[in-house]
Each structure stands twice: as structure tokens, then as C-alpha cells.
Amino acid sequence: EIRLPVPVRTGDGVVDDGFEECDDGENLGVSTGCNPDCTEAATCGDGVRQPELGEECDAGSQNGEPGSTCSEDCMIEVQ
């Protein structure tokens, strides 16, 4: 029996290892989702400040940590 490989389909809600970082079934590129090309969309905590998403800061994994001036929700904290 000959088995052909299953084609990769973006936007089907299934992450195809080796081809996609994510696939939420919508791939609209909004915060906490996936971009149309199945790469991770920008989100608070990725270490890149995106003012268009309402972020005042983004210290990545340091968000909300002691000594950080950036909260877990990417807002500037005065200490």
C-alpha cells in the first residue's frame, strides 16, 4: 500500500510540527493568536513593545517580576 503524505493546511486548528508555530483555526494575527502564516502573533510578554496593542512596555519574562517596571499586563509600574 502506498501512502501519500497528508498536505499541511493552515487555519485548520491543528499545529503541523515542522511547518507551523501555531494554528488556532482562525489565524487572524490578533494578540494571543496566530498570524495568517501560522507564526505566533504579537502578545504581551514576548519582549517587544507593541503600542498598537495598548502595551506601555514589554520586558518579556521579566514582566511583573521584582525590580521590573513593567507589569504582567505590559503597563508601566511605578515602584
Image (spheres, rainbow, N blue to C red):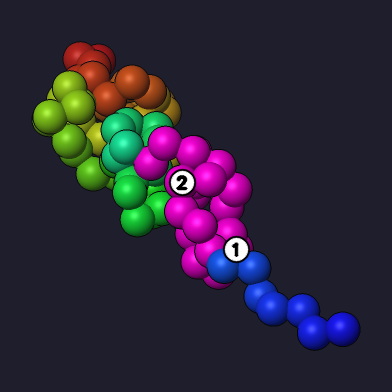
Please provide percent x and percent y for residue 9.
Answer: 51, 57
Q: Are marks 2 and 1 in contact (CB under 8 Å)?
A: no
**Furthest-top residue in this view:** 78
Q: Which residue is mark 1?
A: 17
Label located before the other in sequence (2 or 1): 2
Of residues 41 and 6, the one drawn nearer to the viewer in this rendering: 6
**Furthest-bottom residue in this view:** 2
Circle 2 sits in a helix, a strand or a loop, which is it? loop
Please provide percent x and percent y for residue 68.
Answer: 31, 30
| Magenta segment boundaries in residue numbering | 8-27
In terms of secondary structure, what is the magenta stretch mainly?
A: loop
Where 20 falls versus 76 (above or below)?
Answer: below
Q: Quadrant of residue 49?
A: top left
Q: Residues within 10 Å of mark 1 (few under 14, many from 20)?
A: few
Q: Is residue 62 magenta?
A: no
Q: Which residue is mark 2?
A: 11
Circle 1 sits in a helix, a strand or a loop, which is it? loop
> Quick check: 76 left or right of 34?
left
Q: Is residue 43 visible?
A: no
Nearest-to-viewer mark from 2 and 1: 2
Q: Residues within 10 Å of mark 2 (few under 14, many from 20)?
A: some
**Furthest-front residue in this view:** 1
Q: Is residue 39 visible?
A: yes
Please provide percent x and percent y for residue 77.
Answer: 23, 17
